[in-house]
Image: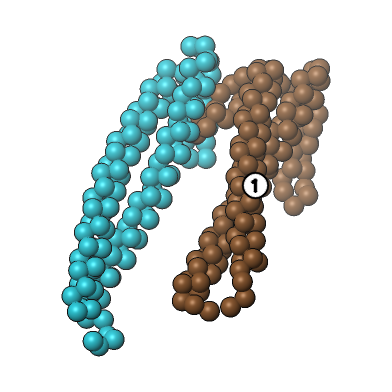
Chain colours: A brown, B cyan
């Protein structure tokens, strides 16, 4: 194998490794964003339920390790929603649902963007693999 | 030509590595600052939409302290200003380190060149 083609092969291998690491990193980000979307969905569904309830609501609060305590929610007119940077705002259930839905949509766009990045990385990996596969035997 | 690297070149290589590490640390800091700034800007945007009598809470350690819109907006703007200044400072440091890196690279090239002759 000539020195140049050996160098090329090494370069391709290094590129392949780097792209695989990038793909892993993007996959991790995707997982985190999807968890945030699920979080938003859960909160929205809970708020929808609470909004439709009338009067005080009897519920149970988890203490951890499968232990729960009975509690009454006296007021569902005020929901405190985090807006980032350690700041939370008091909103009506409808406003809170609106905010969370908007957040969910934005996260959906992030998922699309990350999926696009993953596709690009996949294409580049495939082109490297085909380049390596098409190399004439030395 | 001896295969051993002269002490001067070894020293320059060590310096180059050190500068590289500094650059990486700065890049991480800058990333962190930028995301904090972005988060603060988004929070400010949300606050601007609220009515003046809206009830706002600020995280102080593990506690949420009730506040009002005006105070919170003022504090956020102050925080944004601080973050902007820090970012400017980091950018200047990055420029200095980048120059130093290029300088060291040139010195190394020259040293390797004279060693090769």
Which residue occupies 71% across, 45% down? A63
> 10 Å neighbourhood of mark 1: few (<14), some, or many (≥20)?
few
Asked whether A87 or A77 is in front, the reply is A87
- Give the side of residue A21 with respect to residue A3, left or right: right
Q: Nearer the viewer, residue A1 or A94?
A: A1
Foreground of the two, A8 or A36: A8
Residue B32: give x, y in percent of width and height: 43, 44
Residue B40 visible at all: yes
- A136 vs A38, nearest the viewer: A136
Does dot 1 land on a helix, a strand or a loop? Answer: helix
- Residue A72 location, quadrant: top right
Which quadrant of the rendered structure holds the C terminus of chain A?
bottom right
Residue at the bottom extreme of this rendering: B2
The image position of residue B39, as x and y in percent, is 48, 33
Is residue A100 in view?
Answer: no
Q: Residue at x 66, y 21 (%)?
A: A98
Chain letter for mark 1: A
Task: Say above or below: A131 vs B96.
Answer: below
Q: Residue at x 46, y 39 (%)?
A: B35
How many marks the image carries: the answer is 1
Q: Position of residue B55 (x, y in %)?
A: 53, 19
Residue B58, placed above or below residue A18: above
- Residue that badge 1 annotates: A119
Q: Which residue is at 51% across, 72% downward?
A: A5
Please determine whether, in this image, residue A25 is positioned above or below residue A112. below
Where does the image place residue A21, in percent across and percent down from the top left? 57, 59
């Amino acid at each position: 194998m000539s020195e140049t083609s050996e160098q090329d092969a090494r370069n391709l291998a290094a590129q392949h490794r780097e792209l695989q690491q990038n793909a892993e990193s993007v996959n991790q980000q995707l997982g985190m964003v999807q968890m945030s979307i699920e979080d938003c969905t859960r909160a929205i569904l809970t708020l929808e339920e609470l909004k439709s309830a009338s009067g005080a609501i009897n519920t149970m609060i988890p203490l951890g390790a499968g232990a729960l305590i009975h509690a009454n929610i006296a007021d569902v007119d005020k929901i405190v929603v985090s807006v980032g940077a350690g700041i939370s705002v008091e909103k009506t259930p409808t406003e809170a649902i609106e905010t969370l839905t908007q957040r969910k949509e934005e996260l959906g766009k992030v998922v699309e963007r990350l999926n696009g990045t993953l596709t690009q990385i996949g294409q580049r990996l495939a082109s490297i693999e085909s380049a390596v596969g098409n190399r004439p035997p030395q | 030509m001896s295969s051993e690297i002269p002490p001067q070149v070894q020293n320059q290589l060590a310096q180059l590595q050190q500068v590289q590490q500094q650059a990486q640390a700065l890049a991480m800091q800058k990333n962190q600052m930028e995301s904090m700034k972005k988060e603060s800007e988004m929070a400010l945007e949300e606050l601007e939409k609220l009515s003046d009598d809206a009830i706002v809470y600020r995280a102080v350690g593990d506690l949420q302290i009730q506040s009002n819109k005006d105070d919170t907006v003022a504090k956020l703007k102050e925080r944004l200003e601080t973050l902007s200044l820090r970012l400017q400072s980091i950018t200047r440091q990055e420029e200095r380190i980048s120059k130093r890196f290029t300088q060291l690279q040139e010195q190394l090239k020259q040293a390797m060149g004279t060693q090769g002759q």
